Amino acid sequence: MVKKRKAITLFITLAVIVALIALVGIVFGYLSDARKKAQDKAALIQANIIYADASNALKKYLGKKPSNGILKQIYSIPIAINEEKGNFNMMLACAPSHAAIPIIWLQEPTEKTQDNFNVASMIFNKIALEADIKDPQYLLQLIQYYISSKNKIDFNIESRLEKRLNYLSYSEFLSILNEYNLQKDDANVYKAKWKSFFAFGENYKQIDSNYLSADLVSYIFDIDKQIVQEGFTDNNLKKFLYDNGADMEFFNSKVFSKGVVVAMRCTINYTYGNGNYSFEFDYTQGKVHGFKFYN
């Protein structure tokens, strides 16, 4: 009997030890998670501080009327900022944000937007043909229906919804593609190079003609892509088109900007504590907006 009691006592002791070890593991896991969340919150605060400083720095660097040369420089070379003691590192990289066709231009055209629609629909048809999409007309109808249905928002509910009128995000566009695939059983719609030619998000009135991709210039003006890559280097689209005898049908000053367009999307990557963080923001005509934090 004595031996049995010892065995039972030993069993209970081991069970208690296992339970304590498990509890300690849970507690340490919780503390680790809490520390991570605390650091992420601190990093977010740091991001807001950097954001304010970066926007001020951009305003000073670019000035009120930046030249194409200055813009080309900031688009070409990411700016590295290192603290003297080496405890803080930051990398700023910017890219033109108005150098593609807004997907919102595919909405049903009016007299005012006809030129924009002509360019957007031409690109849409080329993409659809290249991807072998079964029913591009039906897909276009879905896109137009989705855009027009957003115009029926009751603005009395929340004034901020008004900002969504000329907005179509990529995730919203994906939901349209999903609906099309559901109706037409056509997975080719996902293979199309939508992101290579269309811009998602906010609408804008003109395309930044100075920083178009080689793919887009080739598509719109029917020039061999290799010629564009080799020749379109001085960021002067009009001159390049004339020099290469391009089809000027779609070169419209209502669609393509004549001068400098100060519109960029900037990303800042930085270290904080033991983590790496990043955030994005838009800089348009001297104003900053669209802050997004990533951890």
Image (spheres, helix red, strand yellow):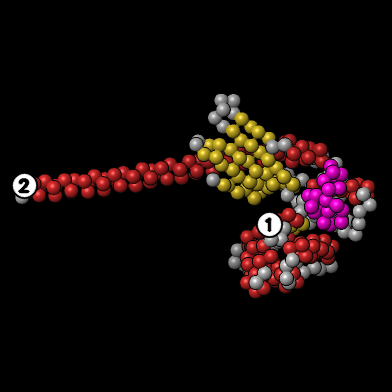
Task: Give the residue number, with chain letter if any, for mark 1.
Answer: 201
Q: In which quarter of the view is residue 80 placed?
A: top right
Q: Identify the residue at horizontal 91%, vertical 47% (top origin).
A: 239
Amino acid type, residue under disc 1 in the picture: Gly
Residue 49's disc is: none
Residue sitting at the far bottom = 183
Q: Is residue 216 left or right of residue 46?
A: right
Q: Quick check: can you spot residue 225?
A: yes
SS class, disc 1: strand
Amino acid type, residue under disc 2 in the picture: Val
* Front residue (pair 13, 88): 13
* Front residue (pair 151, 208): 208
Magenta span covers which residues?
Answer: 212-233
Q: Identify the residue at horizontal 56%, vertical 25% (top origin).
A: 85
Q: In which quarter of the view is residue 162 placed?
A: bottom right
SS class, disc 2: helix
Q: Residue 95's x, y, as percent?
A: 72, 45
Is-magenta flag for residue 147? Answer: no
